[in-house]
Amino acid sequence: MIKIGLLGCGNVGHIIAAHAESIQIVAVFDIIPGRAAELAALCRARPYTDFDAFMREDFSIVVEAASVDAVRRYGEAVLRAGRDIVVLSGGALADEEFREHLVDVAREAGKKIRIPSGAIVGLDNLKIGQVSPPTKLLLRTTKPPASLGLPVTERMEIFKGLAHDCIKQYPKNINVAVALGLAAGRDADVELWVDPAAERNVHEIFVEGDFGDIYVRVRNVPSPDNPATSYMAALSILTLLKNLENPLVVGT
Ligand SMILES: NC(=O)C1=CN([C@@H]2O[C@H](COP(=O)(O)OP(=O)(O)OC[C@H]3O[C@@H](n4cnc5c(N)ncnc54)[C@H](O)[C@@H]3O)[C@@H](O)[C@H]2O)C=CC1
Ligand SMILES: O=C([O-])CC(=O)C(=O)O
């Protein structure tokens, strides 16, 4: 059974712990002591608020479900300690200099940085963009006001531009846009909308290229404990972990 260290004891951390049938959560880490202690008790892991002590535990993978800031702070140390890292807050990798450095460290250490599909689908075959770059790559995200923490009364566009700028303003809401760009090999265009009539976190993906065109719409149920985060994101991590040692690999 794969042993993991869980970095982040919030909403996603709880969903992972509740469905940890095919993994063993050895240790959990959070900057908020009460959160680490509470989640550790639920999944019979050891709680840490000291990162170095957390890293002395016996696990092969760190699963980050914390924040863009946490990836920047701890990503390199995880890889240098000889562990793979699953990064849900993939927005951290929008910064090219940081991303290239982290990839270099992973290469030197012989370890992997894994970005799950998170709250969207289609990252697998969007990688064709690395062979044949898309002429259009647009993510239109629409979230209810509660997901964005904005008390608006009418549908409005709150951002239009490139993913690497959007993630700076909305680090808890648009990690998916950065993941899209990493898959397709170019920064995605983003429209971020807030809509009081929306009950779900909706991601629409538009792609055009010499292959033809794609339109995907994902209508995500918000997580119970954090409406900004779609429930699918936690399921995506669980699925990635479940398949890590499966000899049958499906998808590009
Ligand atoms: N790639 C994707 O598709 C998606 C990514 N996300 C991202 O996943 C992350 C987790 O989401 P949730 O569990 O819903 O968030 P949450 O806010 O419920 O939980 C995050 C936990 O991490 C802890 N934390 C944050 N920064 C930390 C640090 N520097 N060191 C230690 N602990 C730290 C917090 O105290 C909190 O307990 C967020 O960054 C979110 O934006 C969420 C949804 C989709
Ligand atoms: O969960 C979602 O719908 C997307 C999200 O928050 C993110 O990408 O950061």
Image (cartoon, rainbow, N blue to C red):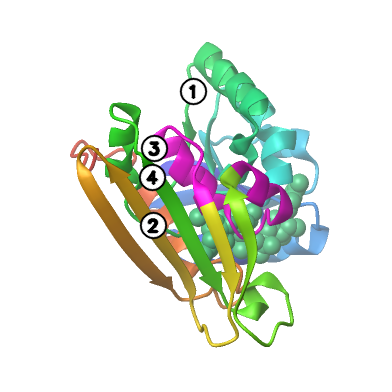
Q: Is residue 134 magenta?
A: no
Q: Residues within 10 Å of mark 2 (few under 14, many from 20)?
A: many
Q: Are marks 1 and 4 in contact (CB under 8 Å)?
A: no
The location of residue 60, given as percent across then percent down, is 51, 33
Q: Secondary structure at mark 4?
A: strand
Q: Are marks 2 and 4 in contact (CB under 8 Å)?
A: no
**Label 1 – label 4 distance at C-alpha:** 32 Å
Residue on which the image places disc 3: 184
Q: Secondary structure at mark 2?
A: strand
Question: Which of the labelled discs sits on residue 205, or is there none?
Answer: 2
Nearest the eye: 176 or 231: 176
Residue on which the image places disc 4: 136
Q: Tell me the kind of residue under disc 3.
A: Ala
User: Between tags 4 and 3, which lies in front?
Assistant: 4
Q: Earlier in the sequence, mark 4 or mark 3?
A: 4
Q: Quadrant of the N terminus?
A: top left
Left or right? Give the position of 9 relative to 18. Answer: right
Q: Residue at x 79, y 48 (%)?
A: 49
Q: Earlier in the sequence, mark 3 or mark 2?
A: 3
Residue on which the image places disc 1: 111
User: Between tags 1 and 2, which lies in front?
Assistant: 2
The location of residue 236, given as percent across then percent down, is 41, 56
User: Between tags 2 and 4, which lies in front?
Assistant: 4
Q: Which residues are magenta?
A: 164-189
The location of residue 180, given as percent across then percent down, is 44, 45
Answer with the quadrant where ligand 1 appears in the image.
bottom right
Q: Earlier in the sequence, mark 2 or mark 4?
A: 4
